[in-house]
Each structure stands twice: as structure tokens, then as C-alpha cells.
Image (spheres, helix red, strand yellow):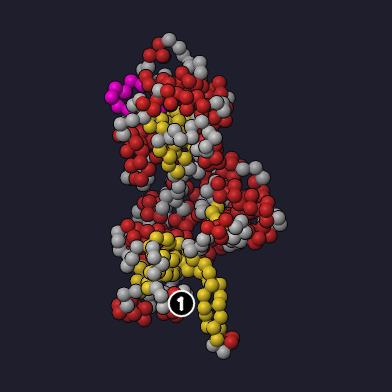
Amino acid sequence: MIRDWGLYMFIGREAELKFLNEKYEENRGQLVVLYGRRRVGKTETLREFCKGKPHVFYSCTQSTDKVQLSKFSKQIFKEDIPAKRYISEFSDWESAFRSVLDFPYGDRKKLLVIDEFPYICRGNKSIPSVLQNLWDAELKDSNVMIILCGSAMSFMEKELLAEKNPLYGRATGIYKMTKMGFYDAVRFFPDYTDRDKVLVYSILGGIPHYLRQFRPELSLAENIRRNILTKGCVLYSEVDFLLHQELRETPIYNSVIEAVALGNTKLNDISQKSLIGDTSKTSVYLKNLIELGIVEREFSVDSKAKEKSNGSRGSYRLTDNFFRFWYAFGFTNFSQLEDGDADGVYEYVIAPALHEFASFAFEDVCREFVKELQKKNALPFRYSRMGRWTGKTTVRDKDAAGGLRTAETEIDLLGIGSDAKEYLVGECKFKNTPFNYSEYLAVKTKLTSLKDTSKLYYALFSESGFDDKITAEAENKSNLLLYSLEQIVNLS
């Protein structure tokens, strides 16, 4: 849903709103935990959900327990409940939480949202126990809905939702909010060209807070100069602000993130590039970044559990496109930006490299496109697993008189059927020239060992179309699928 561009717009999050509304309509007490990394849009989604419903929305602050209880009391007493006639503040949290039963909402659900719940627990560690006892004794069988929201991922997953926590098993709904997908993110820029939609997504990703910093009426280049590279704008200091808020030793984390952003994906390479040296220490820093939703550890789509359990296996990549952009262009040119040379950094550093930079994000867009095709039953078969594939394949060695050898290679997108008898082999090209026939032949050399036992479909995704030879072959071969940028961006 899109509101007036000039005032405020709420876009997407249909799945989250559907989940919350269904819980609201259920005829029983609800204790819902909603969490996710900072900037992902939790608060805005909750406020959208609350519209048209009588409710109390309390945003916790980083304050002492006494101050927190006082602020919570004032928020509750905005409602016409009996207690406000006799007291000006609740004496304890039990009576404060119990007051939800007195909300004057008639037959409608008594809705209480507590945003940034970890802050309230930091000041008083008994809060989960107090809420648990009250829930078990009175609230679970009442017409109430309490939503606990938090951004502190480690607290939410390892403490609040952990077996040792008093609230364990009490939640009637647990929802982890993640970044927006491509198709929701680009709704912020309805007038951009298909190409620029991919480019802006490669820069800002699916974080609503970042997307709102760009003005849709400005060109992509102007938005980058004004709203990322100019000292004083929100995104200029966003990365530094978030790291300082969430982590200690920010100089080391800067080095680790920069190493990953510049293409170092293996643990040892990251350790060497960041000058940490010790891979065990590096893995701890990476683990913390994974918990924050900034980095992910990726495995080939066909990897087994044993490989995933090996701490030295897998590749690391930044999941946050804006972090990747900032460390590729902003962080490395910070001195010039501090001097006010935003135009120079854009013209001489970013503009020449931006298109190639976006090619990595284009692969993510293509994978999301394929997921949408599966939902529409528009693929030749249903895959059970789909993602990037890495492994060895047989190639012809030009330096060995045409002999064959095995080589490390990867496939941008591999969909595997449930019986492993059908495969979708995808190649993504985000470049200014058409996908050519020799590139298609290179794709066909991959997974050649499976050709005798399995059906291989080839899906080619291209920004600039396909040469005539590929187009002609696709007309005669049912296992060759071609997707243009217009089809991918517009789901057509």
C-alpha cells in the first residue's frame, strides 16, 4: 500500500500485516514476539497494524527501571482506566501489565504494543518472570493481545526465546522480520527505469529506512550525491552509527566488513585482509555480524549438513547492500568526502564502477524472480532447493591439446527438483551488451556429469537481451528459457 509521496508512504509488508491481523482476530489471548535487525521497519509496520484499532503503543527507552515504569504508567493512563482515578503511577510492573485488562475497548481486543522490549528488561531482569506469571494466571484466557518487539537480535533469540527464559513457550506467535525483497523495495521508485531499479536496489537493498532517504523524483546519480556522499545526510553516518550502537571494537569490525565487501569470501582471506591473522578470532567477529543481519555464511545449494557444520567451510558475504556499497565506495574514499568532494567521488569512483557493482545484486533479483515464477507454477518443474552453486566441473583445457580437466566453478542460480532428476541451471548477466552464444555454451559445460541421468533446463537472465543465435535456439528447444530485464523487473 502506498500513501502520498509528499507526506509518508507505507509500502509492502503484506505478509507481516496479514500475520498480525490474523492473530488479532483469533478468539483467544495473544502474546506475539516480533523482532528483526535495526532499520528493517518493525515500528512502522506495527503502527500501520494498529491503525483503526484501539491500542496502547509504548516505546521503551534506555533508562532506569524507575523512569521506565513512570513513562509506561503515563502512556497507560492516557486510556480511561479505573486506576488513573486513584494513582498517578503504578507501583510495580505486575500491576502495570495487569492494567491491560482494564483497557476500555468493549468487545474489541485489548491491544498493547511494547516496542524495543529489550530496553525494559535491561533495567529490570525480572520483567519476563513478572509477565510470564501474569500471562499464565490471567492474560492468556482474556481478550488481550500483547506484542513484544525488539531489535537486539542476540537478546531476542538467545534470551527471550530461549528455553531458560520464563516466557519460553508462552508466545502464541513469533515473527522474525527481514529486509524487503526487490519487488517491494523498488515500489519506492515507481518512475525509475528498469535498469535504475536494479541499480538502486544494489545500493540500498531492502531496508525501508535507507530507501526512504532517497527522493523518488531525483535521478539515481543525484540521490547518491545528495543522500549518501554529502556530509550531514542520514546515510553518510549510518554505518558508523549502527556499528557503534551495536558493537565494541568498531575499527576491527570496519576492517572485517571492508574485507568482505571487497570480495574476500573465505575465512582465511578475510582474516588476512583485515590483518587480524587469527582465523578463530575472525570467526567470532563474523559471527557477531551474522547475528546483526549484516553478514551471512553461504553454502552451495547442494551442501550437506556435515559440510555446514565445518567452521572453516562456506563463503561469507554482506547481506546488507548498503553496507556493501558504503565499504566499496564511501569508506575507502572517506577523506575526500570529508573534504566535501561528493561530486568528484561520484564521477570518478562510483559512476565508472556502479554497473559492475550491481551485477552481484542482480543475481539476487533473478533468484527472487524465480521464486515468484514457482509461486505462479510458471517453471517447467517445481524445485525443492534453489540458490547459488559452487563446485567442480569438467572443462576443455586449451593448454593441453584439447584435453579435459576439472575446474572450480559456480552457477549463479541452481534449482534442484525434489527427486534430483531435474535441474534449472541459471546464468545472470547484468551488462550493456547482449547475452552471447559463447556465454551460453559456457553455461552448458557446467554439470555435464548429470546430463545422462537428469533433465537440465537452462535459464538465461539478461539486462540487454540475447544475440540472434540464442534467440533462434530458444525457439526450438523447450529446455532453454530466456528472461529479459523487463520481464524480471516487472514480473511479466
- Of residues 104 and 107, the one nearer the viewer is 107
Give the magenta part as a residue range.
103-112
Q: Estimate the x, y position of residue 197 in percent, counting from the top left.
A: 40, 58
Quadrant, the N terminus: top left
Q: Residue at x 39, y 27 (%)?
A: 140
Q: Is residue 169 visible?
A: yes
- Taking 153 as reference, is 186 above or below it? below
Amino acid type of the residue that numbered disc 1 sits on in the rendered structure: Thr
- Of residues 247 and 203, the one nearer the viewer is 247
- Of residues 388 and 474, the one nearer the viewer is 388
Q: Estimate the x, y position of residue 298 in percent, counting from the top left.
A: 53, 58
- Taking 455 as reference, is 215 above or below it? above
Q: Is residue 344 visible?
A: no
Give the number of marks: 1
Dividing the picture into quadrants, the one containing residue 192 is bottom left
Q: Residue at x 47, y 52 (%)?
A: 204
Q: Residue furthest top?
A: 86
**Is the residue marked by circle 1 packed among few (<14), some (14-19), or many (20+) residues within 10 Å?**
few
Q: Residue at x 45, y 62 (%)?
A: 387
Residue 422 colored in magenta in the image: no
* Residue on which the image places disc 1: 448
Magenta: main secondary structure: loop
